[in-house]
Structures are given as C-alpha cells and as structure tokens.
Amino acid sequence: MTTVNDLISRFEEFAPLLLAEPHDPTGFQIGSKDQKIKNVMTTLDVRPEVVKEAINRDVDFIFAHHPVMFHPARNLDLADPQNQMYANLLEHHITVYAAHTNLDNANGGMNDWLADAIGLQNPTGLVPHLDLNGNPTNYSMGRFGNLKQPMKVIDLGRLCKQVFGINGLRMVTNDDQQNVSRVAILGGDGGKFYPEAIKRGVQVYITGDLYYHTSQEMLSNGLSAIDPGHHIESICKNKLAEMFTRWSDENNWKINVFASQLNTDPFEFI
C-alpha cells in the first residue's frame, strides 16, 4: 500500500527542498512518513475548517502550500484554536506536508501555473534562486514575459479578476489606460522583488500583499502593479491534485486525490 513517503519522495524530485528559501519551514509538518494513505487532499492553507473538511472526507494526508507550523507553538493549550487543530490532526491520523518556496521556485510549479493563467508567452524566471554558495541556479521565483496581445493596464486587472476568480483587487499605476505587453507575476508576498521587474523591463508587476511605501516607490519608477491578493496561489490546489493523480496512475499507487473545496481567503471586498 502507498505511504506518505512514496508521495513525498516523488514530489521532492520535482521540487527539491534545496529550492526552499532560507528560514522557510517547508517540508514534513505533522504525522508519520510511514503512514499508509488512500485519500489525499491538496490545499493552499491548513486551517481548522480545512481540517474539519479533511476529517469529513476521510483524508489520510493533507498536502498544503503554506506551512501549518510557520510559527512554533508556545504551548499545547487546547483552548488555542491552532493547538486544537493540531490535536484534531493527530487524533484522526492525518499527516501534513507543506511545499512552500520550493514549489514557488520549481520549474513547472507555482509561478509557471500563474504565468500560464494570464497567458504569458515564453515566460522566464524573474528572481534567480541562489545555491548555498550564493550562485544562481537554473530555478527562479516569479516569471516575466510578453502578453499574447498588448492590453491596457485596467484590462489586465480585469483579466486577473477573471482568471483567478476574485471579486476585487488593488492597482498601482500612473496611467491605467497605458497599453502594456511586458508583464511579471510572482505568487504570494512579492513586493520586495519589484527592482527585479524594473531590471527586466517589465511594465506591470502582478503580486500580492503590496505595502504602501513600496507601492509609492513603484509609481516613482514608472512601474505599474496589480495586487490580486495572496490567495491566487490557490491555483495550486487543482494543479497539485492533477499531478498527483498522474503519478498515482504511473506508479499504481491506487490513491484518491482531490482538492479542498474551501476558500481560505480572509479578505472580502465591499
């Protein structure tokens, strides 16, 4: 029977842990690597409501993008919702693994999925991943390239709303009617990398969690930006499920893989 380690080992061939950024708690989180698995659920976040969903769907293994234990627990008081969630995972023998910045840097991973979603042509790595000696590798975080057809900044914002299924977003621009073609996208909190976008001749930078002063600096440098939120990374749920199903068929693992049906975005637009 297939074990957690079978799936993890295959995944880490695709996105090695060496691709994780420094101090990022990527990798195995909770449970046993030797656990036998039948039902695997992919998710962006591991939240109490996601764990409840996993329990209801008889899940053995949660495969997440964001680490569930990003900050160490200070105690095991079950009055804390996070601690109670850990207890529920252990009680129901649900193992958890998180593929965070190694998936962001992987070729064919998170940022390629995002680039494909907005139609970037021949996307190229934006922020080179460095090895332990500080030398660039063949992996990168973020992608940049040209749109199939030039479009106005405002229309690119509308395209992001459509392809990522969101109700609203933030735009930073001196001219939302400007026609643009060279675009970069980086999933998650990518504001600090905007100088790389400028260096690559990018006209619009798409990333999440933009800060006030960073956005002002972008405007001063003539760079437009679109902030569709951190949650667009939920594109990984179905992409990972499809990939794991393909691997299951190739290896005769006989596991069921499905994406969480919950939206864990904490923000609403009014």
Image (cartoon, helix red, strand yellow):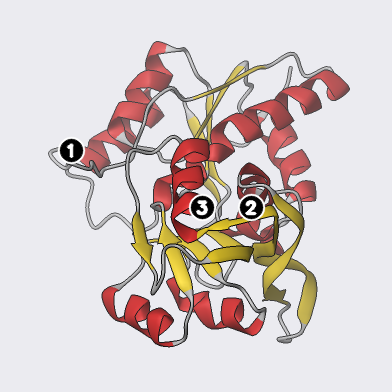
| Tag shown at residue 156 | 3
Instruction: Kindly identify the amino acid type of the residue bearing the numbered disc 2.
Output: Leu
Depth order, front residue of 249/194: 194
Instruction: Kindly identify the amino acid type of the residue bearing the numbered disc 1.
Output: Leu
| Tag shown at residue 48 | none
Q: Residues within 10 Å of mark 1 (few under 14, many from 20)?
A: few
Residue 49 percent location from the top left of the image: 30, 28
Mark 3 and mark 1: Cα distance apart in space: 46 Å
Q: Quadrant of residue 48?
A: top left
Q: Quadrant of residue 117?
A: top right
Residue at 33 percent across and 81 percent down: it is: 216
Mark 1 and mark 2: Cα distance apart in space: 32 Å
- On the rendered structure, is 261 left or right of 193? left
Local SS, label 3? helix
Q: From what the image shows, is residue 17 above or below residue 200?
A: above
Residue 217 percent location from the top left of the image: 38, 85
Q: In the rendered view of the protein, which quadrant contains the C terminus?
A: top left
Which callout, 3 or 2, points to the residue nearer the camera? Answer: 3
Q: From what the image shows, is residue 81 above or below residue 25?
A: above
Pointer 1 residue: 78
| Tag shown at residue 103 | 2
Question: Total label count?
Answer: 3
Dot 1 and dot 2 residues touching (CB under 8 Å): no
Residue 91 percent location from the top left of the image: 36, 24
Residue 30 at least partly seen: no
Mark 3 and mark 2: Cα distance apart in space: 25 Å
Q: Point out the tag, 1 or 2, that comes first from the N-terminus.
A: 1
Instruction: Kindly identify the amino acid type of the residue bearing the numbered disc 3.
Output: Leu
Dot 3 and dot 2 residues touching (CB under 8 Å): no
